[in-house]
Amino acid sequence: MRRKLESIALHALVVMAAVLTAAPLLWMVSASFMRAGAATSSPPPLLPASHTATLEHYRALFTSQSLGRYLLNSLVIAGGGTLLGVAITAMAGYGFAKLRFRGRDPLFRNLVLLMVVPGQVAMLPMFLELRELGLINTLFGAMIPVLAPIYGVFLVRQYALSIPGDLLDAARIDGASEFRIFRSIVLPTIAPVLVTLGVFTFLSAWNDFMWPLIVLSDDARYTLPVALANLAGEHVQDTELMMSGAVVTVLPVFLAFLFLQRYYIQGIMAGSTKG
Amino acid sequence: MFITPALVLIGVFFVIPVLGALVLSFTDFDIYSIGNPADTRFIGLGNYRSLFADPLFWKALRNTAYYVVVGGPLSVVVSLAAALLVNARLIRWKPLFRSAFFAPWVTTLVAVALVWRYLYHPQYGLLNASLGLVGVGPIDWLGNPRWAMPAIILMSVWKNFGYNMLIFLAGLQTIPPQLYEAAELDGAGRWQRFRQVTVPMLGPTFVFVGVVTMIAAFQIFSEPYVMTQGGPLKSTLTLVLFMYEQGFRWWRLGFAAAVAVVLGLLTLAGTAVQLRLRRGGERVV
């Protein structure tokens, strides 16, 4: 009996906490369907008044606010950055785990130490550097932070350590080239961690704000978060319109998370205990 | 070589810029230097001198410290509580609740910061409406210098606690159940089991969570940028926001680089202190 009461109390607590956690996101979705001005009335409504739910704000975003263009920019930056970044990081992680060369371990230790330095420290000189290279205001410039993330190299290396060295040596004796070995033995083995890394990279590239804000000055190149922050400057009164914009910005990463959360959650949990 | 592309990228786009920030901080690089880099002169510690004489810098430093010292521990406590709740033996549908708590972490900060800006609205915001039901009078969350930073902290804790919760869950799952059984046989109550078994066994997890949370907290930028632009009365101006404004709004890149260097040093110092505390703690346990 006591156990039963305890169980009910615990469940009440966890359900309440979950509802509170979800509330801001639920309200965001609900308000995005309200008629203009409806969200700012007293008391604030939780749902659109009956039969007034509307898609007008979504329509407005994609017509008069050219949100489609920003969506495309975000997709190119996050998608392209993820593909390139995962490829580069996979090679490096494998190299540090399994290839023998002079100074490998000290080099790796120094890389890991670099993780303590906040990325923002590098941003001012990086801006000047990219200016010299003509990469300011390019989608490639916005991808740079995710191309070779050190935590990614670390993650892949930890995983690749478990590849049996004998297997690689056997392939070498059979005359397979290093690149062939990487493609047909290493890549299939480390595929799970690459999926994890890919989801991570996509989310961080998609959600990033400060670097795209600095590097993209031309309106046509904005990513969704930059465009949204900009839009908020002009349309702060249009609560419902802004909430539709927020939904469009969050939805792609949210769906990616829902479908791939297995990899994502495992990746975070494994990274912390192995590290 | 397999590691070459990554090393080149890290070298060109991280190591060189970090060293560059150090060099830049000793120069008077400003808007004129962008047009004519030859114009730049070394001015020694000049930027640091003006930085330490600038009340805005101290304001930004205080605000950042407030965010780190209040927001960091709060976030750790909330994450641990969520992890304990989700991990409780009696709780069913664990993965569902785990995902629900984790969801805010995957969302886009700019988007949810906007959502919270409306939730915090003094007149039409849901927060004040709910508080009004229990008789707490309307608070101008983002318009009052006293409440703006707490409001930003609350929003960030909501946004971020899911990540640390996962790390704590991973840590909790490594604790052998026999330890709890043994403690129970010895007559330890729930609180004692938590103090004597859970907390010590989570030691390394606390260090990991502490360091990661603190490093992230020092870098806070987007929340004040989107929600308050550093106001009201600069009460939410943070170090990185200060650096951004000096560097990319007023193009005082040399001066802003000095802020960046201070930020880097503070982060290093904070990490060192946490690791040292942990080692000291281990000796006691």
Image: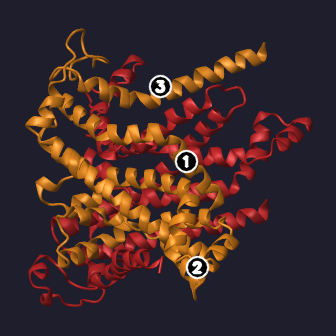
- Between A77 and A245, the residue placed more toward the observer is A77
Residue name at image x 31 percent, y 52 percent: B222
* Label 1 to label 3: alpha-carbon separation: 19 Å
Label 2 secondary element: loop
Disc assigned to residue A175: 2
Whether labels 1 and 3 belong to a single chain: the reply is no
Applied colour scheme: by chain
Disc assigned to residue B164: 1
Q: Position of residue A95 (x, y in %)?
A: 54, 75
Pointer 3 residue: A19
Badge 2 crowding class, 10 Å Cα cut-off, few under 14, some 14 to 19, many 20 or more, is few
Query: Split into 4 quadrants, where in the image is the C terminus of chain A?
Result: bottom right
Q: For residue B239, which quarter of the picture?
A: bottom left
Residue name at image x 14 percent, y 36 percent: A62
**Amino acid, disc 2:** Gly
- Which sits earlier in the primary sequence, circle 2 or circle 3? 3
For chain A, what colour was chosen?
orange
